[in-house]
Amino acid sequence: MPGTVSVTGVKTTPPRERVTAASREWNRTWRRGQSNDDRVARLMAETLEQGLSRLRGRSVRIREIRREFLRSSSSFRTERLHVVLDGGNPLRVFFKDLNPEHQMDKARTVREFGLASSHRELQMYQSVLSPAHFGTLHLYASRWDDRGLYWIFLEDGGRTLLRSFADVERWTVAARWAARFHAATRDLPEAQTSFLPRYDHSHYRECAERVRQILPNLEAGERRLVSRGLDCYAKCIDWLGARPRTVIHGQFFGQNIMLRTGHAGPEVAVIDWETAALGPGSFDLVSPAYFEAYQAETRQPMDWESFCRDLAPVVLYQSLKWLAWWGHHRRLSHKFSNFMKELGTVLEEHFATG
């Protein structure tokens, strides 16, 4: 149930204990379902006050927070915070707990427990994502400390996600947004993007190795198809490694695209940036709308047929990458069989001669 906590008079955080003991205590608090206790809420309020004060250039105080756990939480625990500021002004905030130890039960069975991807999302909001330029969510505040408190507080962008593949109009908007974003981030300085993984030759070779690891567990027919895919993929690695790189989302799926109504800026806001990387823009999304928008933004003449032809190695890589992932978790989802079909299709249509 949502909890309402008055936070008037909060000035300091609880005293810091030894790192390991403090981290264990906070983890126990979350696991017991006691995330509404006053201590957590007060620390949330203090963190948010500090962030809002920096963002607005003046002191901001919080009078009240009502916390609402979001049942739509998929990987990490998320909440909608109904905040009342001094003066009675309301503010809705999206809260995300990025501690991998606090992942949702289903996510814990398939996701790693390292902090790298969590920290990457925070760094994307701090270093790359600009609400003014890209319409991404405002980062109101964050907390990243050795007690296991890995929190971000974002602008609440709403509740509606682009879940339907049949919504061509909205997907066109999303494709144009991706093209503008890729064009704008293709030449960012190294200092701004050094934290991002690079899709280079080493990355593509590691993908091949992960695929080889699942081969012994496949049925004979599956093994033959995946082995053939690996043979074709090995011939593409040098080509893929030489592709121009830009900042990509990495999982540009409908569930990570928020639809914004009554908003003066872009109609979509892309969320969940844990998988961001430096790689070819075509890894995110390709469509005629993307092609046209990217060409317009970069002012570079491009040939549509050549553009589509160059996608075959990308689709091959994507199919193998996800087969390596779902090959270890195929009992949990039908997606392994979906990517097997995709692999078969790309091999038949573009690699028939090997």
Image (cartoon, grey):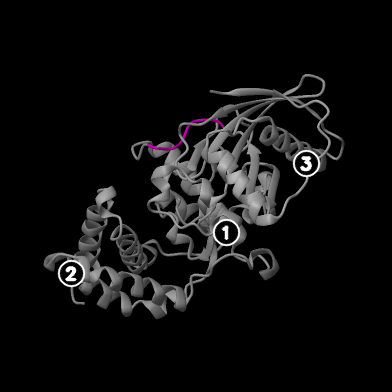
The mark found on residue 33 in the picture is none
Q: Which residue is mark 3?
A: 13
Whichever of callouts 2 and 1 sits on the residue coming sooner in the sequence is: 1
Q: Which residue is mark 2?
A: 223
Decide which of 313, 213 is in the foreground and name it: 213
In the image, the segment drawn in magenta is 158-163
Let me know if residue 195 appears in the view: yes
Three-letter residue code for mark 1: Ala
Residue 341 quadrant: bottom left
Residue 337 quadrant: bottom left
Q: Residues within 10 Å of mark 3 (few under 14, many from 20)?
A: few
Q: Residue at x 84, y 36 (%)?
A: 11
Q: Position of residue 62 (x, y in %)?
A: 77, 28
Q: Is residue 119 left or right of residue 110?
A: right
Quadrant of the image containing the C terminus? bottom left
Q: Position of residue 39 (x, y in %)?
A: 70, 34
Three-letter residue code for mark 2: Arg
